[in-house]
Image: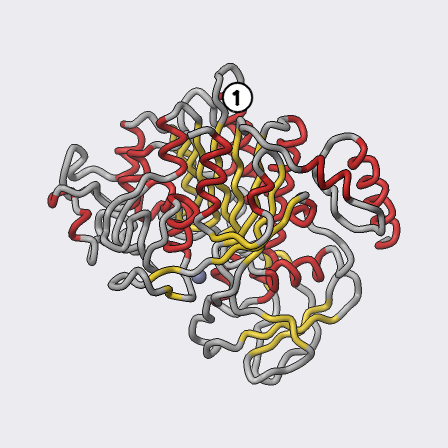
Amino acid sequence: MTLNKRTKLVVGFATCALVAAPVAAFAGGHGDNTRAAKKAIIGGKARNVILLIGDGMGDSEITSARNYQVGADGRLAMDTLPLTGAYTTYAVQKDKPSIPDYVTDSAASGTGWATGHKTYNGAISVTPDEKSVATILELAKKSGFRTGDVTTAEVQDATPAVLASHVVDRDCKGPAVMEGCEVNLIENGGKGSIAEQMVATRPDVLLGGGSAYFEQKSTAGQFKGRTVTDQARAGGYQVVTTADELAKATADKPILGSFAKNNMDLEWVGPKPTLEGTAPASCAPNTARTATQPHLADMAGKALDVLGQQTKKSKKGFFLQIEGASIDKQDHAANPCGQIGETIAFDAAVKKALDYQKSHKDTLVVVSADHGHTSQIVEGPTKGYTATLKTLEGGEMTLSYATADITGSQQHTGTEVRIAAGGPQAANVLGVTNQTDLFFTMRRALGL
Ligand SMILES: [Zn+2]
C-alpha cells in the first residue's frame, strides 16, 4: 500500500513540474529540480497571503508527525511547498533590548512576524518600551484587503492576538483579567483587553476558542457593563458557536466563531510517557472531543471560502492567518499523540491553503512555526519521559520529553525553525532569515 501511494505521488510530482504548479516541485525523486526551482521563484505582488503557523512546530515535531502518519519516506502537505528555509526565533530582553532572550514564547515571536519588531516574551505587538506597532493584518485591512485570523486555541491566545491587539502582557485576554496591563485599561486611556481590541479591529473572519473571555464585561468605555460578545454583535459580527452554524454563516457580515470556552478539544489521544518508557502503542481519535466543534481544516476551508467570496469583485484580496495551536500545548504537556494529532490536523489546513492556491496562483502561502519545542525522536528510554508509538507504516518511534517533570510544563527551545513558501515573494524565505523578515516579505507581497 505504501509503495502504491508513493508511486502515485512520484507520478504526480512529475506532472506538476511540467504544468507550472510549483507545489511539490522539490519533493522526492532523483530528478534534476533546477527548472522547477527556477519556476517557483516568482517576484511581484500577491493578491492574497495565507500564513499558517504551527505553534511549537520545530523540525522534530514535523518529523514525528510525518513518521507516524505517512511514513519516514512519505511527505506531508507542508513538505510539498517548493521553497524552504529556516528562520531564527529569539526574543529580546525587556530592560535591555540589545541583548537577546534566546528562547522565545509565542507572543514575542508572533510580534516579530506580525510587526517586524523584536520584543520581550509576553508582549503582544508592543515594543520593549511598550509602544504599539502596526501589524500586517491591521495594515492589510487599512489598505482595503479582507482579513482572517483562525486558531485552535483561545482566539485571545498569543498567536492570533498579535495580529489584532496590543497589550503589555499576553495574559490580559479579557476585561476581567487585566492585572499587569493597567496601562492598557480603557479607564486609563488604553484600548482594553485582547478580546475587546480584537473585535474592535474586526477581522472579517475570527475563529477559535476563548468564549470565556468574550463573555466577560467591559469595565469602561462605550461598552461598559456589556460583554465582549455584545460588542462584537454591535460591530456587525454574526456570532457562531458550532460547526453547523459556521457552515451556514454567510459572507455578507464578519464572522466571529467561538467554539470552546478555552482551547478547542484535541484530535487524538495516546500513551503517557514514563521514566521507564512504554510498550509500543498506537494513537486513537479523541472520543471525548466535542462533536459540535469544527476541525481546523473546516475553519480554514470556511475562512478561504468567505474571504474568496468577499474579494471576488474587488481589486484587493485578503490576508489570512491559520494557527495549529495545540501542537505547542501538547508538547508542553508531554503528550505525543496529542501533539502529533494536532500536527496532522494542521497539515490538513495546509492542504486547504494549497488547494486554494492551485486555483488562485497569485496567492502567497507561507508555512512556519513560531519556535521550537521539547519533543525529540530518540533510540529508547532517556533520562526524561518517553513513550513509544507504533507508526502506521509498522515502525516503532520513541519520543522523549526531558525538559520538565511530567507534572510540569515542558520547555520551548531556542532553535531556528522551518519556513516554507510558495507563490509570489516566496523566494524571500530561502536561506537563513530572521523571524521579523517574514513581516517585510508579506508586506512587500501585498504592496503595503
Ligand atoms: Zn508554548
Q: 369 left or right of 129?
A: right
Residue at (69%, 78%) from the top-left corner?
A: 379
Which residue is under mark 1? 309
For the residue pair 437 and 54, the one nearer the viewer reads as 437
Place residue 90 in its image quadrant.
bottom left
For the residue pair 247 and 179, the one nearer the viewer reads as 179
Residue at (38%, 29%) from the top-left corner?
A: 141
Residue 238 drawn at (x, y percent): 38, 28
Q: Is residue 256 above or below residue 270?
A: above
Three-letter residue code for mark 1: Gln
For the residue pair 448 and 306, the one nearer the viewer reads as 448
Regarding residue 342, the answer to whether it shows in the image is no
Residue 305 drawn at (x, y percent): 55, 28
Residue at (75%, 61%) from the top-left corner?
A: 72
Q: In the rendered image, which quarter contains the C terminus? A: top left
Q: Check disc 1 and report its element: helix, strand or loop.
A: helix
Q: Is residue 20 above or below residue 429?
A: above
Residue 417 drawn at (x, y percent): 55, 58
Q: Mark 1 Cα within 10 Å, few/some/many (few <14, many 20+)?
A: some
Residue 113 drawn at (x, y percent): 43, 47
Q: 275 left or right of 133?
A: right
Q: Is residue 383 above or below residue 407?
A: below
